[in-house]
Image (cartoon, rainbow, N blue to C red):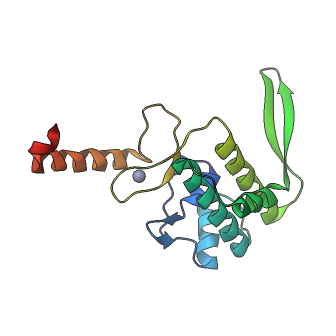
């Protein structure tokens, strides 16, 4: 089974990316099971995973576009995040926020994904969408110069722009 997995992003981002290129990569229960196994997470209910994924995908799309989302999607993500609570831990290196599960199984897995999606949407992390031709994967811009989801997309994008410039030298100004 082939999935658009970057392998570098939080699970919330990788899950949103299963809707890509006009294709639902989680369209069957087998594919949902396959995806969760591939990213190293326990199995979850396929229908619930898709409901959360769809809402997160629409919220990320709205965030990147700078528009307000549908309130229903906000409520879906809040509902899924309920089994996860934020906990303060204080170690020698200082205070850290930790997610703590108040449920088990699939509810806890999806709870953590929903909580991470909330952090990504509301926190300081810069959520971006790849601008390479034919790619629209989300990624967290962890480096100020990062513009693509993967170095291979950067390579393709630079090549495409090089060929456009060669074809139409008159529009270079
Ligand atoms: Zn890309």
x, y percentage for residue 52? 69, 64
> Where is residue 150 shown, x and y percent of the image?
42, 47
Left or right: 14 as drawn, with respect to 134: right
Q: Give the x, y percent position of residue 126.
A: 56, 39
Q: Residue furthest right?
A: 102
Asked which quadrant contains residue 148, the reply is: top left
- Is there any visible trace of residue 101 in the rendered image? yes
Q: Is residue 32 left or right of residue 21?
A: right
At x 59% / y 66%, what residue is drawn? 35
Given residues 62 and 6, the one toward you in this image is: 62
User: Quadrant location of the C terminus?
Assistant: top left
Q: In the rendered image, is residue 109 in sight?
A: no
Position of 124 relative to 6 (above/below): above
Where is residue 95 shown, x and y percent of the image? Answer: 81, 26
In the rendered view, does 124 fall on the left or right side of 20? right
87 up-or-down from 66: above or below? above
Give the residue displayed 34% in from the left and 45% down from the top: 154
Q: Nearer the viewer, residue 101 or 140?
A: 140
């Amino acid at each position: 089974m082939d999935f658009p997995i970057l392998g570098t992003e939080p699970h919330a981002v990788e899950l949103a990316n299963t809707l890509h290129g006009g294709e639902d990569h989680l369209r069957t229960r087998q594919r949902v099971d396959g995806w969760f196994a591939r990213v190293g997470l326990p199995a979850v209910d396929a229908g619930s995973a898709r409901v959360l994924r769809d809402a997160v995908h629409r919220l990320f799309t709205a965030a990147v576009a700078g528009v307000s989302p549908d309130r229903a999607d906000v409520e879906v993500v809040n509902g899924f995040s309920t089994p996860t609570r934020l906990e303060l831990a204080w170690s020698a290196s200082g205070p850290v926020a930790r997610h703590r599960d108040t449920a088990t199984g699939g509810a806890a897995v999806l709870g953590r994904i929903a909580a991470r999606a909330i952090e990504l949407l509301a926190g300081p992390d810069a959520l971006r969408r790849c601008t390479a031709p034919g790619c629209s994967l989300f990624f967290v811009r962890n480096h100020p110069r990062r513009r693509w989801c993967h170095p291979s997309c950067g390579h393709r994008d630079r090549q495409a722009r090089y060929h456009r410039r060669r074809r139409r030298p008159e529009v270079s100004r």
